[in-house]
């Protein structure tokens, strides 16, 4: 009974992480399309949500291998998974609050590794795999995307430079819709599968699925797809603003270069079994498309903040994961620790949402009273 | 966590393949699409100036480029489904 309640808590938390993954990474897919007016914000987000949902059904192969290459899955318990997920969600919310695009996958890996280190020490973590599958790709992805997008935008400007702007702008806006759609589909395929993998690992740890017959149940696929699509539809506007207009002021050709090159790099690296973070690739692509036009076109301060968040993601999510695991251990083993942590997290989230709602209501009331005063006395 | 030897951990050959293929594909798609857009522009100009032959040539080039881009999209979906 206790174990089933714990499993339910882990599944809900995993879907919560999937939701934050969706709204955190919406920006990768829609930011440049929105900033260049290729699509209206609502249309861009709705398209991205639908394609993320569809993408989750395309392939299930990553779900079977997620995290197993980096951590010893036999050592994973539901309590460790729960702590790792809470750590990842916490880091996702912090970076979202500061409008920083960071990798949700790295946050998840960091959170689970942190919880695992707190529980078992270094025994459950495969250090070499961590370097090969996480650290090296994290360095490679933005640099590769920066260089390729930079070369691409130089070539594009040479080809269309003396053409009339009207058709060129419309053409590249269409290209952005196409490349953005590919990115959304790829994101749904990659990221929803991570949550499917985590839930399936929890089912294995619970004993509902035999480790010898590892498969992802249909309800897990549907739930993970729905959570990431809903998260995408909720839209992480702070990160959309950063990626769409705070790094560079983008034109449609630059937007297409960043997104098109991003899609090409992500799919090529996936083909060679070397998955790169969508966030790192797109952010690098945006910087490359700006820097190739003019180095000073890139706000390097913003780019530096983003790079700092990337460096901090793994250790910070790990610290949060370890902290949550420690809190659970402090509260006693079994069900009590995770339940209290879950209630605490829900309480904090509810309070933050209520505060935000009150702030918005206060601002709306102030705007109404301001309009009324300016109507009566001609000033506010 | 064991001793870490960077050369042994990272498959340099695969890494180089990722870099080269990404560069070729990323640049290739951008160039093909840009040529397609430029051709569409040329087609509009030719139609406005009633240059039928030039218009047909631009149209063929534009269709070829867009077919190339669509082929890349299909290839991308194929890669997603296979991995």
Image (cartoon, helix red, strand yellow):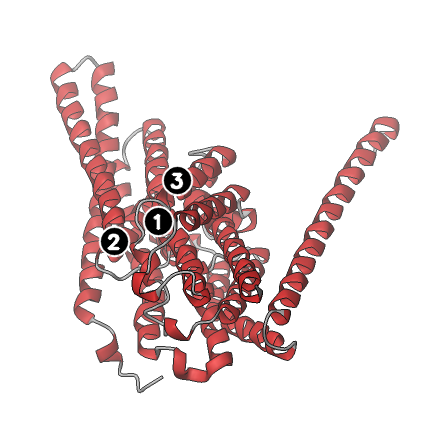
User: Residue A167 bears which disc, if any?
Assistant: none
How far from the left and from the top, in percent, is residue A68?
34, 68
Q: Are marks 2 and 1 in contact (CB under 8 Å)?
A: yes
Q: Nearer the viewer, residue B1 or A300?
A: B1
The answer as to whether the residues below labels 2 and 1 share one chain is: no
Q: Compute the Cα span from label 2 to label 1.
A: 10 Å
How far from the left and from the top, in percent, is residue A63?
35, 57
Q: Nearer the viewer, residue A332 or A179?
A: A332
Residue extending furthest toward the top: B50
Q: Is residue A353 above or below residue B48?
A: below
Residue at 26% from the left image edge and 83% from the top image edge:
B5
Q: Compute the Cα span from label 2 to label 3.
A: 18 Å
Residue extending furthest toward the front: A1
Instruction: Give the residue number, with chain letter if any, for mark 2.
Output: B83
**Tag 2 subunit:** B
Q: Is residue A179 above or below residue A265?
A: above
Q: Nearer the viewer, residue A24 or B50?
A: A24
**Tag 1 subunit:** A
Quadrant (top left/top right/bottom left/bottom right) for the C terminus of chain A: top right
Instruction: Give the residue number, with chain letter if any, for mark 1.
Output: A189
Residue at 42% from the left image edge and 83% from the top image edge:
A122
Q: Is residue B25 above or below residue A48?
A: below
Quadrant (top left/top right/bottom left/bottom right) for the N terminus of chain A: bottom right
Q: Secondary structure at mark 2?
A: loop
Q: Is residue A165 left or right of residue A302?
A: left
Instruction: Give the residue number, with chain letter if any, for mark 3.
Output: A51
């Amino acid at each position: 009974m206790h174990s089933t309640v714990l499993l339910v808590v882990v599944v809900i938390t995993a879907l919560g992480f999937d939701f934050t993954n969706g709204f955190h990474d919406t920006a990768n897919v829609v930011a440049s399309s929105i900033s260049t007016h290729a699509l209206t914000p609502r249309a861009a987000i709705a398209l991205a949500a639908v394609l993320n949902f569809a993408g989750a059904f395309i392939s299930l192969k990553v779900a079977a291998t997620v995290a197993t290459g980096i951590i010893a899955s036999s050592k994973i318990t539901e309590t460790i998974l729960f702590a790792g997920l809470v750590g990842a969600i916490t880091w996702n919310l912090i970076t979202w609050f500061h409008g920083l695009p960071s990798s949700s996958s790295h946050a998840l890996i960091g959170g689970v590794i942190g919880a695992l280190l707190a529980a078992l020490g270094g025994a459950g973590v495969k250090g070499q795999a961590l370097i090969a599958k996480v650290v090296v790709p994290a360095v490679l992805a933005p640099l590769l995307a920066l260089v390729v997008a930079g070369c691409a935008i130089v070539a594009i400007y040479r080809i269309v430079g003396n053409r009339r702007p009207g058709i060129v702008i419309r053409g590249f806006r269409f290209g952005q819709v196409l490349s953005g759609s590919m990115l959304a589909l790829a994101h749904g395929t990659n990221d929803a599968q991570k949550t499917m993998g985590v839930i399936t690992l929890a089912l294995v740890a619970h004993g509902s699925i035999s480790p010898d017959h590892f498969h992802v149940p249909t309800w897990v696929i549907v739930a993970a797809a729905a959570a990431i699509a809903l998260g995408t539809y909720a839209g992480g506007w702070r990160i959309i603003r950063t990626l769409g207009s705070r790094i560079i002021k983008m034109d449609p050709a630059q937007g297409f270069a960043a997104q098109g090159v991003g899609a090409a790099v992500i799919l090529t690296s996936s083909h060679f079994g070397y998955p790169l973070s969508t966030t790192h690739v797109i952010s690098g692509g945006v910087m490359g498309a700006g820097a190739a036009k003019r180095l000073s076109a890139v706000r390097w301060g913003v780019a530096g903040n983003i790079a700092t968040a990337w460096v901090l993601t793994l250790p910070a999510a790990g610290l949060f994961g370890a902290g949550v695991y420690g809190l659970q251990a402090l509260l006693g083993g079994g069900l009590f620790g995770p339940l209290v942590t879950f209630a605490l997290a829900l309480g904090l989230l509810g309070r933050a949402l209520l505060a935000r709602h009150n702030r918005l209501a206060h601002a709306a009331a102030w705007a109404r009273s301001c309009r009324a005063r300016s109507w009566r006395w001609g000033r506010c | 966590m064991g001793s870490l030897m960077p050369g042994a951990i990272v498959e340099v050959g695969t890494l180089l393949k990722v870099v080269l293929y990404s560069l070729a594909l990323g640049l290739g798609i951008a160039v093909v699409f840009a040529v397609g857009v430029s051709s569409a522009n040329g087609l509009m100009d030719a139609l406005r100036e009633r240059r039928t032959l030039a218009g047909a040539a631009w149209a063929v080039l534009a269709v070829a480029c867009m077919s190339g881009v669509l082929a890349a999209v299909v290839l991308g979906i194929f890669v997603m489904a296979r991995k």
